[in-house]
Image (spheres, grey):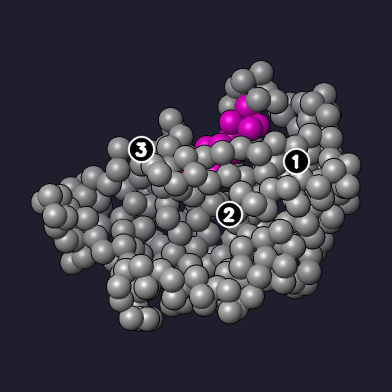
Amino acid sequence: MHPRNSHRQGYNFDLLTKASPELLNHLIKTPVGKDSINFSDAEAVKCLNKALLKHHYKIEYWDIPKAFLCPPVPGRADYIHALADLLKQDNQNKIVNNVSALDIGTGANLIYPILGESIYSWRFIASDINPKAIKNAALICKENNLSTKVLLQPDNTKFFKNILDERIKLHISMCNPPFHNSAESAKSATQNKWHKLGKKPNSNLNFGGHSPELWCEGGEVGFIRRMIKESKNYGQQCAWFTSLVSKKESLSAIKLALKKANALEVKVIKMEQGQKVSRFVAWSFLNNTKRQTFYQV
């Protein structure tokens, strides 16, 4: 994990249960006698998230409606830290203060604005096409006195239009796109997870997710291509556009789309969490000199 990630040493269940005593109801013992939870149990994972957010980030209230994705907090924190490093490279290797960020598809969980605001005091705009997700995200903001501005995107074909106007300048945009290309593909992936666990399908298992969170036309490549195309219209307003990329095989098509869009700079940044390797792609339509103006306070 990233060197600044608070979760590098794993889960301290003694501290987490003190922060959130309800987590005690979900503790189990591993074969070697250590405390853990059943990570295929949706309620247990949600309870763990509540404890992590309360202990590490001082978030007193956090909840999500049934069927919405429950994010793994440590991995999500890595994306935030890696974005901070990306901005730092433009700023004489110094952490950038007063960062303005856009989280595209924030979901009901609002995880990236929570982490970015808690760790680095970033100012967020958080958008989503789902009214139920927006309602829940706004409640999380209200209950925790977060400064994040939560906005409904009324057009599911747009990413920046309706959310940004010409007065807004961003240091960074971020996104965790749906990576399946159909409902059938998403369902098949879920069934494979159940099969690997040797269990029958169960709605209480932590393999849920609202449909727009899991799949879209063209999968992640189609989604990111559309984002790239529209981002060009906002290339003077945002220093860096970024998106997570789930599949390594998707990178060639994404890089080609960025070349066609005439992005001036493109980076693929890897993040490692144990055995898992994730990545995000970052692109800018500005040269380094122009990006410097975004970091001047």
Task: Name the amino acid type tagged 2.
Answer: Ser
* Nearest to the observer: residue 268 or residue 14: 268
Q: Which residue is mark 3?
A: 8
Q: Earlier in the sequence, mark 2 or mark 1?
A: 2
Q: Identify the amino acid type marked 1.
A: Trp
Q: Which residue is mark 1?
A: 283
Instruction: State the image coordinates of residue 46 (x, y, percent, origin top left).
Output: 35, 65
Chain part drawn in magenta: 77-88
Most prominent secondary structure in the magenta stretch? helix
Return the mark for residue 246. 2
Q: Give the amino acid at mark 3.
A: Arg
Q: Which image quadrant is residue 42 in? A: bottom left
Report the Cα–Cα distance between label 3 and label 1.
28 Å
Task: Give the structural element (helix, strand or loop) at label 3.
Answer: loop
Q: Residue at x 67, y 44 (%)?
A: 281
User: Is residue 86 part of the magenta span, yes or no?
Assistant: yes
- What residue sits 72% from the left and 29% below the top? 295
Tell me which numbered mark, 2 or 3, is placed earlier along the sequence. Answer: 3
Of labels 3 and 1, earlier in sequence is: 3
The C terminus: image quadrant: top right
Q: Secondary structure at mark 1?
A: strand
> Which residue is at 34% across, 78% downward?
204
